Image (tube, rainbow, N blue to C red):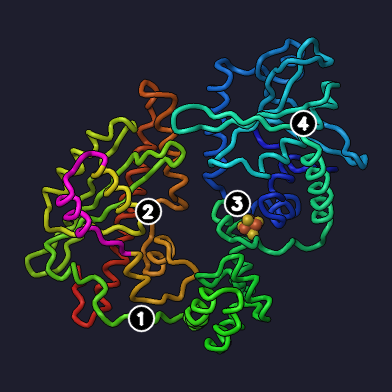
């Protein structure tokens, strides 16, 4: 069930999938130095999810290759399909799974259809067009046209199945995509960076492209500029970060208003952000204390959640308990990590009791977290578990979103205000190189195996704890910096 390697002569499903994600990615897959690729947990998560979906779909191990097709096995993997496009060009595909359906083929009184496992909740062109390529080539191989394909995905409760009919519209889209892909691959230089750079975080070329973007002063490097704003700025003749930093904010606001009032309002802060990034100097936006709650706090709870979004399960609520010494200085030496693991979704009540007990044990300690996820999850959890409103309100007042405080009080010389970016800028280093939320999720899935009896890989659980603890400490690195910037800063320790 692996990837098809890049085509030596001709196009394949892997290049097509890359191209549908980002035109530049397909070009890099084929032409760039493979040593510059970065490992990403995303692909492994995809394979893991695929494995689970296919097991649930088939209920038996699939057969392998041509022989399995001749036997008429229910599921078949490992069949490499080769054929010709409408224009006679060589095409290749390696379907992750073929499933037997009613029909007639050269193998007997049955036929096959290609199956894909989707990640995420929506069915997109990235699923449908590669499936169409597989359907075309499978039709040639089995000598019987494929009229429908199958996409499966893990739902919150059970496997979800979507039938995708092979319509003439889809056939046209496939032909068009292959034609454009072929033209892109013949270029001597790579296509431009993806318009929506958010997708880069999952891509194996992110480092290479990130370097290119900052070298070129690409507009997407300015925090607050997505694909749409970038297009507007291009239309106004602003091509890069330096152009934006040099723009007159009032004039730009007037020009951008024609795209909508909100864009006019954003123009001034975009220019200011570009200037801060160009000059590499942070700018204070609000002179009041960013974290007044820390001034008299006897300690803080640093809080970070790890989740499995596919099944909407927060499997780890991690806390670092950071006390303060009698002389008012924070005491990192005495900090303790306290992980609360919620093994299964339906263990939530037990998890909540332990979590509530911890919060009650330190009633006057603020709870610091980075981003909205933790406060939303905790408040919803408390509500689901029937905590009375006055107590819920009390917990809410203790929750402090450090990210929101950063945004309100500072403009930073960074292209992102995410925890990794801001804490790294403050000099914080994660103890496990390359760890991120996706990798933690992969470790969690590996640790879980196929069920409670198979949980053997305790090492991966330790890695998750370490990563989660580091995220809590990174939150502190940012909060501590914020506090120290106040005239009578409460940092130190
Ligand atoms: S890192 Fe971004 S721009 Fe570069 S290939 Fe990947 S998705 Fe495209």
Q: Which residues are magenta?
A: 384-402
SS type, badge 1: loop
Q: Is residue 309 shown above or below 431?
A: above
Residue 424: name its quadrant: bottom left
**Marker disc for residue 478:** none
* Residue behind mark 4: 135
x 49%, y 32%: residue: 155
The numbered mark, 3 or 1, whose residue comes first in the sequence reads 3
The numbered mark, 4 or 3, whose residue comes first in the sequence reads 4
The numbered mark, 4 or 1, whose residue comes first in the sequence reads 4
Label 3 crowd bin: few (<14), some (14–19), many (20+), radius 10 Å: many
x 38%, y 56%: residue: 430
Whole-percent x, y for residue 390 in the image: 15, 52
Residue 395 forms part of the magenta stretch: yes
Nearer to the camera, 329 or 106: 106
Nearer to the camera, 73 or 468: 73
Q: Is residue 226 shown above or below 367?
A: below
Residue 1 makes an appearance in the image: no
Label 4 crowd bin: few (<14), some (14–19), many (20+), radius 10 Å: many
Nearer to the camera, 232 or 71: 232
* Residue behind mark 1: 285
* Residue behind mark 3: 204
């Amino acid at each position: 069930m692996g990837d098809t390697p890049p085509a030596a002569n001709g196009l394949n499903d892997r290049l097509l999938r890359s191209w549908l994600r980002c035109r530049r990615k397909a070009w890099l897959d084929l032409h760039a130095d493979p040593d510059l690729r970065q490992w990403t947990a995303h692909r492994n998560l995809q394979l893991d999810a695929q494995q689970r979906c296919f097991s649930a779909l088939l209920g038996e191990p699939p057969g392998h290759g041509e022989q399995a097709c001749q036997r008429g096995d229910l599921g078949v993997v490992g069949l490499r399909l080769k054929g010709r496009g409408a224009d006679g060009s060589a095409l290749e595909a390696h379907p992750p799974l073929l499933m037997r359906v009613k029909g007639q083929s050269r193998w007997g009184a049955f036929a096959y259809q290609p199956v894909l496992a989707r990640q995420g909740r929506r069915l997109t062109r990235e699923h449908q067009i590669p499936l169409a390529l597989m359907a075309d080539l499978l039709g040639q191989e089995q000598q019987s046209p494929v009229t429908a394909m199958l996409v499966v995905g893990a739902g919150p409760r059970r496997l979800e199945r979507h039938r995708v009919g092979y319509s003439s519209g889809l056939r046209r889209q496939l032909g068009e995509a292959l034609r454009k892909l072929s033209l892109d691959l013949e270029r001597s230089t790579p296509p431009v960076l993806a318009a929506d750079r958010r997708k880069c975080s999952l891509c194996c070329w992110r480092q290479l492209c990130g370097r290119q973007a900052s070298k070129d002063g690409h507009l997407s490097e300015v925090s607050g500029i997505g694909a749409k704003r970038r297009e507007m700025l291009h239309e106004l003749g602003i091509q890069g970060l330096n152009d934006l930093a040099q723009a007159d904010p009032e004039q730009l606001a007037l020009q951008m208003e024609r795209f909508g009032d909100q864009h006019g309002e954003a123009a001034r802060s975009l220019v200011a952000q570009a200037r801060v990034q160009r000059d590499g100097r942070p700018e204070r936006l609000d002179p009041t204390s960013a974290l007044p709650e820390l001034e008299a706090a006897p300690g803080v709870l640093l809080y970070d959640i790890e989740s499995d979004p596919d099944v909407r399960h927060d499997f780890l609520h991690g806390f670092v308990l950071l006390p303060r010494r009698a002389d008012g200085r924070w005491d990192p030496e005495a900090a303790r990590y306290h992980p609360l693991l919620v093994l299964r979704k339906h263990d939530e009540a037990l998890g909540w009791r332990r979590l509530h007990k911890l919060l009650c044990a330190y009633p006057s300690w603020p709870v610091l977290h980075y981003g909205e996820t933790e406060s939303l999850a905790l408040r919803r959890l408390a509500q689901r578990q029937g905590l009375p409103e006055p107590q819920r309100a009390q917990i809410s007042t203790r929750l402090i979103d450090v990210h929101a405080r950063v945004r309100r009080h500072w403009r930073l010389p960074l292209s992102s205000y995410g925890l990794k970016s801001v804490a790294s800028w403050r000099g914080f280093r994660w103890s496990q190189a390359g760890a991120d939320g996706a990798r933690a999720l992969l470790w969690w899935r590996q640790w879980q195996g196929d069920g409670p009896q198979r949980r053997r890989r305790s090492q991966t659980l330790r890695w998750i704890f370490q990563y989660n603890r580091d995220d809590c400490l990174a939150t502190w690195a940012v909060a501590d910096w914020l506090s120290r910037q106040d005239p009578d800063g409460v940092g130190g320790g």
